[in-house]
Image (cartoon, grey):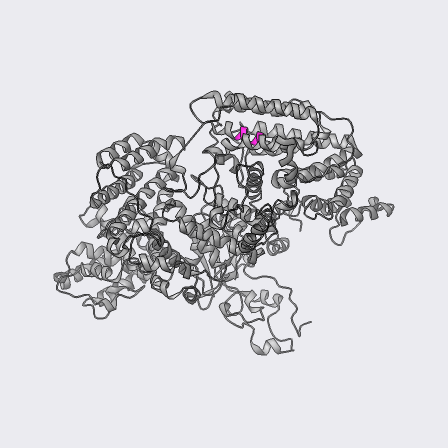
Amino acid sequence: MSLAEFDEIKYDHSTTRLDVPSNYLIRKARRNPHGLEDLRKSMKSATIYVGNLSFYTSEEQIYELFSKCGTIKRIIMGLDRFKFTPCGFCFVIYSTPEEALNAVKYLSDTKLDDRNITLDLDPGFEDGRQFGRGKSGGQVSDELRFEFDASRGGFSVPLVDRIGVNNSHNFGARRVRDTYIPGQDDAFEDEEEELDTYIPGQD
Amino acid sequence: MSGVKRRHDFDDDDGYRDYRPRMPKRQRIPPVVQLCKEMMPDIRTIGESVKAFEEDIKFLSEAIVNEFGNEKYFRTALLSTLYAVVVEQPQKQPAIALLTMAVNSGSPTTGKSILNFFFTKLQEWADHSIDDSFEVTSNETGAWNKIKLLLRFLSLLSPMVLQDELILLYKKLFELSVELNNLHPEKRNPLSEAIYTNTLLDIPYLFFFERTNESLRENVAELISYVETQYQVKQTNISLIKEYNKNPPYEAVQWIQAVLPNVKRVLADNMQQLSELFPDYDHLLPEQPESQGFNDPLNLPTVTQLESFSGLDKGLGSVDGMWKTPRHSFRVYLPNSIGEFETVIPLTTYAGMLFDDIIIDIVESVEFNRKEVARQVITLDLFFKPGIFTEPGQSIAQLVALHEENPIISTFKIEDLAIENILSLIFKLPTVSQSFAYFYTLLVEICQNSPKAIAPVFGRAFRFFYNNLDSLDLELKLRYLDWFSIQVSNFNFSWKWNEWEDDSMKFGESFYNPKVTFMRNLIRKELRLTSNRPDVEDSLTDEFKKYLDSSFIPKDQLLQYYQSFFKDFQVDPELLRDNDLYFRQDCFPFHEKVQRLLDYFHKQPLDRNVNEIESILKELQADHGEIIVDFNRFAVTLLTQTLVYCGNRSISHANKYISDSRNELEELFSKMELAQDLKELWIIEAVIRYWNCNSQNGFLIIDTFKNGDMVSIKSVLNFSFLDVNDKNWGLVDATSIESTIRNLTELSLRKDISVETFEFIFERLVSIVGDVITKLEVSLEEEIVAPDIDEGSMIDVSAELPRLDLTWKYEISMSFIKSILRKYSDEYLSMSERLKTVTDSNISHAPTRTLLQQWLTELEQL
């Protein structure tokens, strides 16, 4: 699906802008009938999505850094939907859309708690989105991760799956998306990265 | 250049242009789009590779000449790209001008089209300059800054443009600046200063490709003598916007004073300085056909139209806005700290001023991509004559050695220049042009690109500010603290703490010493930025471990606070634990009732009835009233702390509990027959004492109470500036100061402006100052200045500490007043006469009174 102004090549600046939807959002929007609308909404919303946080990063730490871009109205920590513990993402709601864009421009790829955080535009928070949508309750991206990451719960793929060769394991991106999650509307999925990493033993 | 080569391939491939996919499997890009996609990035990066420069100009100009007449898409893309580079990356202007003139020699019509386009832009910006409804984005530098950049570009095109027409542009701008300046001869006119400086700064660019043109020289000499005689440079001195409250480490130079001598000097001696600054592109410049003119004369707005805009205070652009107050030099890398040489080109040279101007333009206009800015500002030397700067990454030790060996070799460091300019934007007073986060992360980005070269440069800046903390403006101290903490948090919190050990040993016991308060606040802030405490702990030397205790007030005072609720009952200090509700401890006589309160607040709001709390409180009073001193105070504190405890997992938890219970508390509190101020003070105190281990949380939770209208901003400020045994946390603790600023800013943004709170805080601070003066027992005329205590001084610090502390307290309070007067000048201006009376009646100490009066008078100049 064409994404109107988001597909255009622009010549109005001498370099690219950092406050544009990420490739992930663009790809997602293309698959979604309301994609364009959502993208436009996300350019005007005061909400941003913050990813790649350490599970141990607290709301107060996020406040300390993100308040340098504007007045924060609310921080919504992303939680493991079974354990209700932080699972590595959050939404920050500013008081104006400009502040949200500023955060995306200025803070993406900076370090918080020794991790490079990722920021993305967001059309606006809705209840339910604060929960991880992975099978285990956390973020899908963690379930696709093979490396050990101490601040994101260590290994997430069980050892047997990491070395296994059978096709019965469930960590392929598509399979995970099919998982039924009560109360979740597929249109609002956004936490996980769609990874195209090579997975050994998978066709 | 791959784009251009590809295009040639397409040309060979006959019929390619007619190719229309019938059923494209995936979207195919039309050839012209493909061409632009490949060619425009080459224009944007022109000059970045010195080796490819000559070829780039050649191939690009040929391609433009061939393509310009064909498709509108190409023309639009090309002109937009050229324009974007000209206004966003002014260092590349000479390259773009060269490209334009190469095009012009190949096709004068195309050259003329490009010239027309830029002239139209110039006219557009002149029109925008009086457009109130003009929408400003964060990367907008302002109409007059754009006019400066476009005029500079047109000046570069001097070989292809009729000389008289170019000179006429200058003349009109100078005349306008003179007229504006004469509007009110006694008052400074910001716009006039901006136009005057900008236009003068552009003049040398007329000679970029025309160094030997005699008639041009004559015309320019005439222009310069016109402004020199007609423009009256005004002296302004506003102490409210000075970065240092006393003993400035350098004498600031004002742009308006320095620009004309700079320009005259650069053009003198057969333009010797100019040829040392600008690269020589003459051999690349093809023969120009007949000179072109502009289609229309430039129409500048009239002085009357401009009058209401001439304060440059309407927020119509970041760089234009910098002229609101007199622009002056800001230094960090001073020569005397390292040796007898400069590492930054001084503002009193044309080159120094131009570099400052260009760096600020890049930083402000490309704020949407800090990564690009980080790259451009550090490689600026590529676009100027080689040899101006020393090798990139040269250390100071190497420079000292080099300088000794050969004193005429350049010691200018491009890193110092770029970073000093970015710091000047961070430390800009009275207002800052972008969010702090931008500048902070821009600096982090620059450091990440080449840590080895940049980290020592930052280190020198950190030390410079640290050494000047005694006199640095209070607001700037906060910015320094923020920058420092964010910077080190991105680099594992590593800092050479041992450098500061002496100060900590000497002044560790002091409450107000600027260096100690800075270190204390810094370590606490670092702790707030990490979830892994050892990261910070391990970075500290033993001397500093004592600052790891982040208690807001010391434990004994906390104990006193809890003890003050009771009679005939001893509070056990062991039970005062961080982030725990004291009243629920098992040993407490009524802990079960407190548990019932906790259970109550944990219930869903719909399932509860406020009578339940009332009955618990009644029982409590009946059963244990005899050990409680003031039951109302106890009840307010208990309820507040119970709520805060329920929401102790995070700020949003606290928010939830507080907003769920807001109405209930209000109902309960309203039944107490007490002054509202008192209740609010108790609420605030209860929260801050609960979060004694993390006052930042405490103040953020107070914000929630405030947003729910349960406490007023005035009450928060009243609490913050309470003086207990001469200790006033509101003056030294960063979380408290941040809360104060946050609250005042919120108040100033509200529509219904009531200045009462602003008046309150001014009076409160003045009374603190008055109190300190009394305690210092100085004579009415004697200045109060904290002594410089360095290794050589004879002061016995431990014996003198109480008095020293009072002097520092005096300086901090005064600096606080200065900062808020400046920051909220609009609010204070409206009541300045009243405040002068307040000052007169409260302060009898002459130097203090004079200074306060002076600040109040200066308000109208902000």
Tell me, yes or no, whether the highlighted magenta stretch contains residue A37: no
Residue situated in front as seen by the camera: B504 or B660: B504
Q: Give the image location of residue A5, x and y in percent.
A: 64, 44
Residue situated in front as seen by the camera: B423 or B705: B423
Report the number of numbered marks.
0
Q: Is residue B2 above or below residue B230?
A: below
Residue drawn at (55%, 65%) of the image: A140
Q: Give the image location of residue A52, x and y in percent.
A: 53, 61
Q: Which image quarter: residue B358? A: top right
Side of B530 relative to B170 (left or right): left
Q: Which residues are magenta?
A: B194-200
Q: Give the image location of residue A155, x and y in percent.
A: 54, 73
Asked whether residue B609 is in view, the answer is: no
Residue situated in front as seen by the camera: B50 or B70: B50
Q: Give the image location of residue B238, x and y in percent.
A: 40, 34
Q: Is residue B436 above or below residue A113?
A: above
Q: Is residue B551 above or below residue B310?
A: below
Tell me, yes or no, whether the highlighted magenta stretch contains residue B196: yes
Residue situated in front as seen by the camera: B338 or B291: B338
Q: Quadrant of the C terminus of chain A?
A: bottom right
Q: Which image quarter: residue B275? A: top right
Side of B425 relative to B649 (left or right): right
**Identity of the residue furthest to the front in this view:** B405
Q: Is residue B742 above or below residue B76?
A: below
